[in-house]
Structures are given as C-alpha cells and as structure tokens.
Image (cartoon, rainbow, N blue to C red):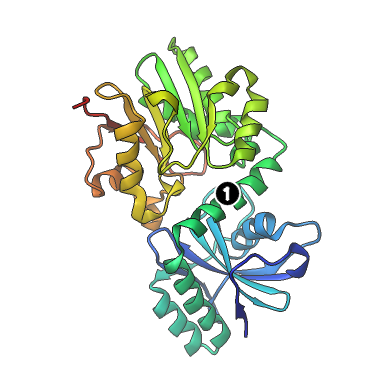
Amino acid sequence: MFQLISADPPGDQVRLITFVPFLADGRCVLIEDPGGPALPAGEVQDGEDYAIDTVLRVPLRTAGFRYQRFHPFGLDRDHLYAWIEGGPYTGSRPHRSATLSFGPAEEAAERLRAHGRPVLAAAVRAAAESYRGLDEQAFYADNRRTLETAYLRGTTPQQGSGFGGGELDWQQARRHITEGIAGDGTFLDVGCANGLLMESVAAWCAERGLAVEPHGVDISPALAELARRRLPQWADRIWVGNAVDWRPPAGQRFDYVHILLDSVPRAHRADLIRHHLAHIVRPGTGRLLVSDYAADLAAGQPSAAETIRSLGFRCAGQTSGGDRPGRSAIPTAWITADPAP
C-alpha cells in the first residue's frame, strides 16, 4: 500500500505512475475496460521527466485524457500515485479512444473495490481528499512548477507558451481572441509565459489596421525573464505577479485584459474577475477577455461565457472559438468594465 506524501519525489525514484483523473467540476473519471473499471497507469520511460512527459503520455495513451493540473499524493517504493485534472482529448496527438465514466469519487472507489481492486479504491479516496483539500499555496506552487518545467524546456515559441502544436495550429487556436478587440489600445496578457500571445495579438490586430500595445505579467520570474529576452523591445512592460492580486505599477489601466480562469482555484474565479475589473481594466471603455482552455461542452465543462454568467457577471460577447481541426470551438468571452464611480 502506498504512503501519503506532501512533496514530489526525485525523478530517478519514480518508475511507475497511477493517475486518478478528475474533471474540472470534481467528478472522478474511470476507464471502462472489459475486465472492469480501471485507472490510467504506466511506466516512466527512459529520458522522460515524469512530471512533464509521463503525465501527458500515459493518460492520453491509456484513457484518451489530457491533463491540465497534476499533483502527486502517494508513493509505494518506485510507484507514484498522483491525481490529474483535465478532460477527454479529441486532438491529433496519439491517444486511445477509451470508454470513460464520470461520477463522484466515492462511487468510483466503491466500484473499484467491488471489482477486487482495493489499492486503486484506496488511491481514489486519497486522491479525492488531496484534490478537495488542496490549499491556495499548493495550487500556485503546482502551477508554477508545471509551467516552468515544461515551458522553459520548449524548443519552439509555441511550446514556450504551453502549446503543443505548430504555428498554424497556434493561429487556429488563439487568433479568435482578437475578435474581442474592437479598436486601438493597450493589451495585457495575464499569464504571458514567453510572451507569444502578446506578440501574436499585436501582429494579428495590425493586420486589421489596429494599433495594439502589448503588455504581460506571469507568476513565474523565470518565464517573465524568458519573455523579456524574446521581446527586448517590450522588456519594461513585462512583470511578475499572481493573477489573483497583482496590480500594475503607478495605477496603470489597460483597454484589453486577457485572463485564464484556471490560473486560480475554482472558488476564487469570481475574485479573479472582480479584481481585474476593479484594478486592471480601464473603467468604462475597457474589456476583460476571459478564456478557459479546458472548457469542453461534451464533457460537461462549461464555456467561459457560461462560467461568467454563473458567477453573476454580465457576458457582453464571445468569440467564435477558432477553427483548429479536430477540436470543438473554445470561445473567449468578454465583460465590459463599468465606468469609474
């Protein structure tokens, strides 16, 4: 039986990983195999970083599941147990078209126990306790660890921005964000990574005859520094800060601000939106552009517009969601800032 852990084990200690998947709404995911319910599991291959490579490859190849968040919680010698949050995958990477079921973790654990898999049942229960009890400090530490490790290792501008496709895929998946930009002005990318979206938005808007001045902020000092090196002409407008409470210097406001809902714990999404409307977006004329790259209507994960409305905000519009082949549209929604009091 595994022992609960509070820190990531060294990479050379882990040879096998069992994953407990969750959807963003908290439902646990099981693979429905002929022999009964199962969890994605597999070996760490030679040369892999388990926290970057194995966590992507194994859930895709065994369950057709793409992770967004990853957190180890148990260890049995060289066998790591970790929960992941994400959703079913429909893209072009190699993946299994598995039959999946979704439900409360307690029901998933009971089904595994009834099929003679008590260790997996215990793993689901422990994963659910860890997943539900993750505090804010651990959430942001997980985000920073995953982003820094993966993005700094990227060999293309897209990989350095956390995107798996090439230049054309990037345009098809992200260009639609600029549909929410209606005129000249300043643009702030919150969670800018290596600055590729800053750079792209400015170029795509210029093709429409719009003059957009890009800015960026990221929770990772290493990624902010990478963005400054890539874009030295904008180095003085790239900052370090946490999306949930960062404020720009000298009270600066921006005409267009792009945020990601998954940059904060789900319980703080409304706080994230309120903070940017109150302190970052230009009052009266500014727009807060809100994206949720994990949205998937087929898997029961709502669009950004639906989430905005459920949190009590008025959605003023949304984009087309792009035209990336093999993927359902993932629109960016926007909120118009109220005038200053």
* Closest to the observer, 322 or 253: 253
Residue 118 position, x and y percent, is: 54, 87
Question: Where is the N terminus found, in terms of image quarters?
Answer: bottom right
Tell me the residue that label 1 is attached to: 144
Whether residue 327 can be seen here: yes
Q: Residues within 10 Å of mark 1 (few under 14, many from 20)?
A: some
- 130 vs 265: above or below: below
Q: Position of residue 259 (x, y in %)?
A: 42, 37
Q: Is residue 334 visible?
A: no
Closer to the camera, 134 or 212?
134
x 51%, y 59%: residue: 138
Residue ID at (41%, 50%): 296
Residue at image position (81%, 61%) is: 46
Above or below for 99 versus 260:
below
Residue at 24% in and 23% down: 284
Q: Residue furthest top?
A: 209
Left or right side of 300 for 223: right
Given the current orientation, which residue lies at the most extreme left position? 341
Question: Label 1 amino acid?
Answer: Arg
Q: Quadrant of residue 178?
A: top left
Mark 1: secondary structure:
helix
| Left or right: where 265 falls relative to 326 | left
**Residue 266 appears left or right of 164:** left
